[in-house]
Amino acid sequence: MHERGFMKRERVFKYSLCCRLIISLAIAFCLSRIGLVSPALGQSAGAAPAQIDYDETTHTFRIDGGGVSYMFGVNQNGELQTLYWGKRLRSDDPIPPAHADGGTSSFDLSVNATPQEFVGWGGGLVVVPDLKVSFPDGNRDLVLRYVSHAIQGNTLTVTLKDISRDVVVDLIYRMDEETGVLARSARIENRTQQPFTIEQVLAATWNLGPSSNYQLRYLTGRWVGEWNLQQTTLHPGKVVLESRRGSTGDEVNPWFAIERTDQRDEDVGDVWFGALGWSGSWQINVETDWQNRVRITGGSTPFDFSYVLAPGQSLETPKFYGGYSDEGIGGASRLLHRLELDSIVPEAPHRRLRPVLYNSWEATGFDVDEGEQEALVEKAASIGVERFVMDDGWFGERKDDHAGLGDWYVNPQKFPHGLKPLIDKVHSLGMDFGLWVEPEMVNPDSDLYRKHPDWVLNFSGRPRTEGRNQLVLNLARDDVRAYVYGFLDKLLSENDIAFLKWDYNRNWSEPGWPAAPIEEQKEVYVKYVQNLYSILAELRAKHPHVEIESCSGGGARVDLGILRWTDEVWPSDNTDPFDRLSIQNGFTYAYAPGLMMAWVTDSPNWMNGRSTSLEYRFLSSMQGSLGIGANLNKWTPEDFAAAKRLVAEYKAVRATVQDGALYRLISPGNSEYSVTESVARDGHEAAIFAFLHSSQKGQPYPQLYLRGLDPDAEYSLHMQEGKLADGTAQRASGDYWMHHGVSISLRGDFQAAFFTLEREAAR
Ligand code: DGJ
């Protein structure tokens, strides 16, 4: 029996028993994705087992997958010691067996000097521990040693145990054959006779050998300013990336990459990268020692954390994914994109391409009603939209953001006949229907809060801090979970809804759970997220045709945990097409363009007043999953004609954009330019989007040197939007386009171009 991350075993049994009674194999499949049933059921079809070997003479483990080898061994102290992580090695390449580093002085003990796979706080450890516990007798020393291991397909489980107490830790390594990305987690089990408290538990430690030129990259942001790529040289010391917000957050995303290279090329050099599959508070620590060796630990943040494990109970951490590329940060992104699309998202590996959608938010705000929405529906259909989504404002007494959250009935003034007439209209025009919800929140001005004021996160007798006039429901509570699942199930059962935009518009405050026993109250951080995942799992099992977008006031809940249950994400409320170039660029370091919803909205933009052409706005959005969020009631016939043409152009290349290999030819950064190239999986086509901020001093647009083409194949060039420079070839070899390049003509301010290369049949 495998367990969901961070759940006590007893509860798992209760939960899975109940599920089995009411739901069939379909839910078993879904639940397997969070580990409730055998992982084999949840394995993506077609993924061949990776190679996992154990050499009994040298006590060395070796895991190979994709272009990666990962090795560790049991040293003379019984510690699990990292030996190698990087480019795939030959089977006869020499890797010396594990041997503990003795340290250099009495101030530098072996336990700290030896790069370990997972280490308890004990025996003089001063680096970040993976596990720290306190026992009822006052002992807080924990020293973990290798006991045994088991290999099952592409999963290796290594069992460690404390030197004297029955604290057992299973380290789980699962290799993705295609990308070489390892998913690591740990399961802590109490086999003693007494409860003990877990004060800190992380998923894994990743170790990198010494180098003086490691560059750390990570992504920071804020509302309307998400996805900024940061870079810093690693020096001895510690960098902590963290969210204490209760959810993933946009201040920093749970992703990192570390480059070892002197080359300043996006697609060259050794890069190690990792990302957490967890949508609650989290932490990633990057420690560099005096020898310039790097140690990366990550999981749920230890801040305000404690978890009591009774005898017989166990707790499994979230997954910490880690990978390696020798094709620079660009190669690292492409591996992550492949992993997300082929192994993580709900329908992987047979994910549906994202439909072109329309969303009402920027057009009508909270003022939705049947007549106005129906008018938008007709206009959206006329340009080729495939999904119509009604955003906030359709329920309860929702007139603005002061009231209504929690009361999930259709507002009878706005929709006197319910949602059916609108949905029928949407269907009659060949589109499917989507709806906005924010299930985890409540306005104090709501029937739900008046009836259940105790359902929110709070500390007894303390103020309840509001954000956007709302409070956070305590999803860790069984009654709240039942309410949230219940209303969503009813909504989806009673209406023909194909898509939910699942919003989440504030961080936690006063994270108390007064109804729980005091020693269990901090479990809220874990239990909340588990219930969120289990609601999503159960909904998907019961309503398998429904797709879900994760939105959090923009991109504040994007991570590999939520992506197991959602089909796409909303990266930012900032829809200005120029700002979006850098926001979208940052997003793609960690997440696939096909997961990123990007709307074309009105000009001037609501946020910064910038005016841009419809073509520029479309081309900016066409680099991800295209959506339209403009007020179509204000469009001219020319706008409709242009939009229709651009939607058709997008549909023709969307498989390449959403599913292909992304090359960031020129990242916006501080440059005037921005260029992306997506190459189709089968290589038959490349789609290139180029942008100019403003022409300066007659400077021509830079020559574009394409990437990822077959050097010997012939490709023909098709200019879809914009102009080529005079004399540019129309047909040439892959080598020509990659080394001679393409010359386009872009002049003026906020200009854009789009062209494709199509591979010709071999002569
Ligand atoms: C925040 C989202 O990011 C927006 O797109 C919109 O759905 C609003 N919430 C609605 O309240």
Image (cartoon, rainbow, N blue to C red):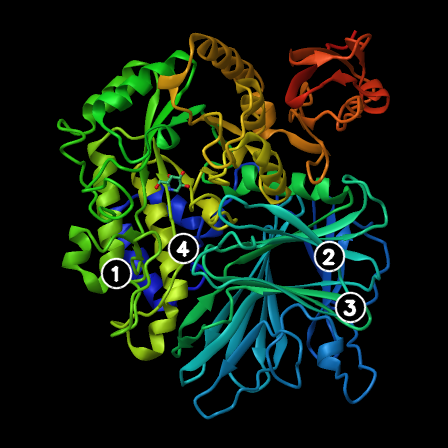
Q: Secondary structure at mark 2?
A: strand
- Helix, strand or loop at mark 3: loop
Residue 178 shows in this picture: no
Q: Which of labels 4 and 2 is toward the front?
A: 2
Quadrant for the C terminus in the image: top right
Image marks 4 and 2: residues in contact by CB distance under 8 Å: no
Q: Label 3 sits on what residue type?
A: Thr
| Tags 3 and 4 touching, CB below 8 Å | no
Query: In the figure, is residue 388 to the left or right of 611?
Result: left
Horizontal and vertical percent for residue 408?
21, 43
Q: Residues at badges 4 and 1 in contact (C-beta under 8 Å)?
A: no
Dot placed on the residue nearer the N-terminal end, 3 or 2: 3
Mark 1 highlights which residue? 478
Q: Which residue in the structure is indicated by mark 4?
A: 36
Local SS, label 4: loop
Which of the 4 image quarters holds residue 661?
top right
**Mark 3 sits on what residue?**
58
Reading the image, the residue beneath label 2 is 232
Instruction: State the residue in front, 460 or 428.
Output: 460
Of the four image quadrants, the one with ligand 1 is top left
Rounded to the nearest angstrom, the CA distance separating label 3 from label 2 is: 38 Å
**Which residue is more in the foreground, 156 or 588?**
588
Alpha carbon of mark 1 to alpha carbon of mark 2: how far? Answer: 44 Å
